[in-house]
Image: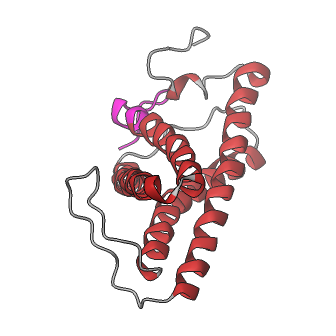
Amino acid sequence: MREHHSRYSTVSIVLHWTIAILIISNATFGGWMEDASDADKLGYYQLHKSVGITVLLLSLFRLGWRIGHPWPAFPATMAAWERVLARSTHVLFYVLMIGAPLMGWAAASAGGAPEVPLYGAIPAPNLPLPQSEALGNDLGSIHKMMVKAIYVVLVLHVLGALKHHFFDRDEVLHRMLPLFRNPRA
């Protein structure tokens, strides 16, 4: 069951842009959390954890949706190396969108962070990991490396979409835009 040949489904488009906005927002919240005074740190931590677990859940749903609804076919003119790079980028995105929140949650859990409810209302217990500052720091370092990897993959993703739009002049960018159809099609 392939999605329309030149367009992603509404569900795919909504998930794509929602997760993108949440990831960019959460990177900001994470920076605020690190720079916050002790009095404000817990509030930013709660927001960062809430959005991170939301990204995790939406990414798992998106992965399930993707399995049941394969992406549209590549343009016929797309080179083999571009196809490999595009698929690799998408797979890496899934690994990072699922792995980074899990590593952050694990780091907080192992490091003894308080169990804060998501969005102030939904229980979100710490993961059952041994309490260890060293383990928390190691997992936190992995979380930060994965976030940096998200930035790199995001730049590649955006550059690829812009290349397809401005140089190849194909429908690749338009098929993921929520309100715009490809005027060239």
Asked whether 7 falls inside the magenta stretch, the response is: yes
Residue at horizontal 53 percent and vertical 85 percent from the top: 133
Residue 15, by quadrant, is: top left
Colour mapping used in the image: secondary structure
Asked whether 163 falls inside the magenta stretch, the response is: no
Is most of the magenta stretch helix, strand or loop? loop
Relative to 8, residue 40 above or below: below
> Would residue 168 be found to the left or right of residue 104 on screen?
right
Q: Give the x, y percent position of residue 45.
A: 43, 57
Q: Nearer the viewer, residue 154 or 89?
A: 154
Q: Give the x, y percent position of residue 152.
A: 72, 50
Look at the image and give the residue range highlighted in magenta: 1-14
Residue at horizontal 49 percent and vertical 67 percent from the top: 104
Residue 108, by quadrant, is: bottom left
Residue at horizontal 72 percent and vertical 31 percent from the top: 77
Number of disc labels: 0
Q: Give the x, y percent position of residue 180.
A: 49, 14
Q: Give the x, y percent position of residue 121.
A: 20, 53
Image quarter (top left, top right, bottom left or bottom right) of the C terminus: top right
> Would residue 37 be found to the left or right of residue 64 on screen?
right
> Would residue 98 be found to the left or right of residue 126 on screen?
right
